[in-house]
Amino acid sequence: MIYWVTNTVGSAAQIYYENTHALPPLGYIAVPTALALFKADILPPPREWATRHLNVTRWTSMPRGGHFTAMEEPELMAEDIREFFRPFRTIRPAQFH
């Protein structure tokens, strides 16, 4: 509301416009990727787009939380990060060659 009342919504949103119009094409990223989507996320990516561009190995739909996840739901976020990395604990560095 403060952006609308102070007539600064345009300048506040400018970075989002610039990012969507100035970034180079993404291409495919093969690094294992986890996405946690929280109920109140501002702009969640479509699953089809994410799986087309990223090696999505974990997709979690969270029951609550939003844009400030680390402050709103730190336990949910931390547990999801732990679950994502858990399978990598058994991989030895030599297996990456």
Image (cartoon, grey):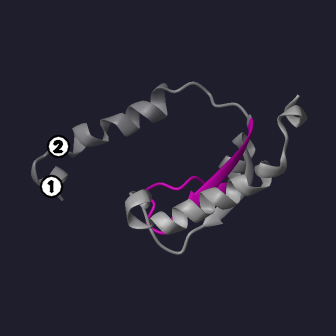
- Front one among 29 and 76: 76
The answer to if 1 sits in the magenta stretch is: no
For the point 53% across and 62% down, which residue is it?
Answer: 77
Q: Relative to 24, does residue 9 appear above or below in the rendering?
A: below
x and y, in percent, of residue 3 in the image: 18, 50
- Which stretch is magenta? 30-47
x and y, in percent, of residue 94 in the image: 88, 32
Amino acid residing under circle 1: Ile
Q: Distance between the residues labelled 1 and 2?
A: 8 Å
- Label 1: which residue? 2
Quadrant location of the C terminus in the rendered image: top right
x and y, in percent, of residue 55 in the image: 75, 44
- Whether tag 1 and tag 2 are in contact, CB under 8 A, the answer is yes
User: What's the mark number on residue 8?
Assistant: 2
User: What's the mark number on residue 78?
Assistant: none
| Side of 45 relative to 41 (left or right) | right
- Front one among 90 and 15: 90
| Side of 77 relative to 83 (left or right) | left
Quadrant location of the N terminus in the rendered image: bottom left
Looking at the image, tell me whether mark 1 or mark 2 is earlier in sequence order: 1
Residue 23 visible in the current orientation: yes
- Furthest residue to the bottom? 63
Q: Residues within 10 Å of mark 1 (few under 14, many from 20)?
A: few
The answer to if 46 sits in the magenta stretch is: yes
Amino acid residing under circle 2: Thr
Residue 37 visible in the current orientation: no
- Front one among 2 and 85: 85
For the point 38% across and 61% down, which residue is it?
Answer: 71
Q: Is mark 2 on a helix, strand or loop?
A: loop
Q: Relative to 73, does residue 15 appear above or below in the rendering?
A: above
